[in-house]
Image (tube, rainbow, N blue to C red):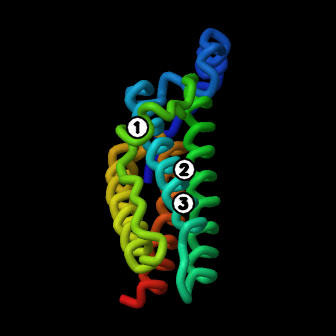
Amino acid sequence: MSDDFVLDVTKIRDEARRKMEAGPVTDSYGLDKDRVIGILNDVIATEVVCWLRYTRHAISASGIDRAQVSSEFTEHAKEEMQHALRAAERVSQLGADPDFDPASLAQRAHTDYTTPPDNDLKAMLEHNLLAERIVIASYQEIIRWLGEHDPTTRRLMESILEEEEEHADDLVDLIGV
């Protein structure tokens, strides 16, 4: 078994000094940074729209199961906003400004903002489950695309994906399917 790993620390130090303005992005980054930033800004839009939808549904829900469903929507909304903030922080680490422009959020989001009737908890649950399934599929694609080229963004997306899958599972339980 051969060990051909060689680490040229002198070269790494010299390169780091020459390109300090690049922050955490090094020559070994491996992807088009602007493309990753664009994708993350779409993730931000998706998460903000999900936060808005869950928040609206939590506040407007009515009916006999309102307390349980509203509580779940509120919990999910908080987590969706945290996802957006975490993606925004990564955009900033990559040297760009996160895009929270309200004028373009809905167009960039992978999911829709829906407002079923206040007394239709099942429709609210179904709309949110559909959105979670869309997010799960699109984030899986992003993770596959990132591969080993950007492990930090990949791990971020994997941790968000894990929570989105938990959301979908919670919603399935509430719907009773």
- Secondary structure state at the residue bearing disc 2: helix
Q: Earlier in the sequence, mark 3 or mark 2?
A: 3
Q: Earlier in the sequence, mark 1 or mark 2?
A: 1
Is the Cβ of the residue at disc 3 closer than 8 Å to that at disc 2?
no
- The quarter holding residue 149 reads top left
Report x, y in % for residue 111. 37, 53
> Which residue in the protein does label 3 denote?
56
Residue occupying the point 37% across, 67% down: 127
> Image height check: is 59 above or below 64?
above
> Which residue in the protein does label 1 denote?
39
Residue occupying the point 43% across, 54% down: 1
Q: Is residue 129 left or right of residue 91?
A: left
> Which residue in the protein does label 2 denote?
156
Decide which of 165, 9 is in the foreground and name it. Answer: 165
- Count the numbered circles shown: 3
Q: CA distance from mark 3 to mark 2?
A: 26 Å
Q: Earlier in the sequence, mark 3 or mark 1?
A: 1
Q: As shown in the figure, which amino acid type bears the numbered disc 2?
A: Leu
**Neighbourhood count class around disc 1 (C-alpha, 10 Å): few under 14, some 14–19, many 20 upward:** some
Q: Is residue 144 left or right of residue 65?
A: left
Q: Is residue 174 left or right of residue 86?
A: left
Report x, y in % for residue 15. 59, 15
- Secondary structure state at the residue bearing disc 3: helix
Residue occupying the point 62% across, 44% down: 85
